[in-house]
Image (cartoon, grey):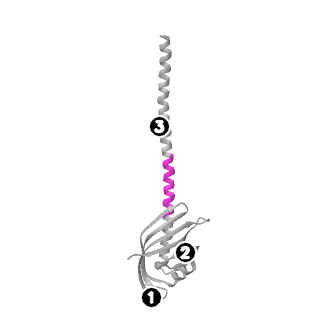
Amino acid sequence: MTCTQATGPSYQGSKIETNREKSMKRIWTVCLIALLSLGSASLLQAQTGTEKSVAALEQQWLQSQKTNNSELVAPLLAEKFINTGRDGKVTDRTATLATAKATKYNSVDYDDLKVTVFGNTAIATGGFSAKGIDPSGKAFETHERFTDTWVKMSGGKWQCVASHGSPVV
């Protein structure tokens, strides 16, 4: 009887310990999942915040066209900015700003604007429709798809480093 009593409580004790261990493992697993979820949520919010910031910069660019005010777009373009126009012509920042200043828009709009973030780079894509007078004084109407490449510069400011437009026919 002594032997049974000695093994009985010992067995019972280890079974209780096993249940406690299982409970603790569950608690730790739930805590770990919760922490990972919080980390993922804040990363998603940060990306969403960046996407919204870059989309707002795209809207500022659009506003510069709507108001024929090239000064609104100038700070958005990096010093080494390159534009590839719908005709395939490649222009630098200075030439792009000169064209923006000389172009007079009667109507301009974006559609289907999407921003995708890859670390310190963001790609904005969308549709662009405009009517107006080009720098040579000729009336134009255009429908394009565009791709703008934005980079977060060392000071934390987002700037567009490249833009490309393709005609939609």
Which element is circle 3 on? helix
Magenta residue check for 143 = no
Is the C-beta separation of discs 2 and 3 under 8 Å? no
Percent across and percent down for residue 104 are 47, 84
Q: Identify the amino acid type marked 2.
A: Ile
Q: Nearer the viewer, mark 2 or mark 1?
A: 2
Q: Identify the amino acid type marked 3.
A: Arg
Residue under the point 50% across and 31% down: 21
Number of other residues with Cα within 10 Å of mark 3, as a class: few under 14, some 14 to 19, many 20 or more: few
Front residue of this view, candidates 33 and 138: 138
Task: Name the outermost residue toward the front.
Answer: 88
Is the C-beta separation of discs 1 and 3 under 8 Å? no
Vertical arrangement, residue 77 with respect to residue 46, above or below? below
Which residue bears the numbered disc 2?
82
Q: Marks 2 and 1, Cα distance to the nearest angstrom?
A: 24 Å
Instruction: Give the extent of the magenta segment.
Output: 35-51
Percent across and percent down for residue 53 are 51, 65
Per the picture, the main secondary structure of the magenta-coloured stretch is: helix
Percent across and percent down for residue 139 are 42, 86
Q: Identify the amino acid type marked 1.
A: Lys
Asked if residue 77 lies left or right of residue 8, the reply is: right
Which residue bears the numbered disc 3?
26
Which residue bears the numbered disc 1?
138
Task: Name the outermost residue toward the bottom.
Answer: 137
Q: Nearer the viewer, mark 1 or mark 3?
A: 1
Q: Marks 2 and 3, Cα distance to the nearest angstrom?
A: 55 Å
Residue 152: quarter of image = bottom right
Number of other residues with Cα within 10 Å of mark 1, as a class: few under 14, some 14 to 19, many 20 or more: few
Pick the quarter of the image with the C terminus.
Answer: bottom left
Picture disc at residue 169: none
Residue under the point 49% across and 36% down: 25
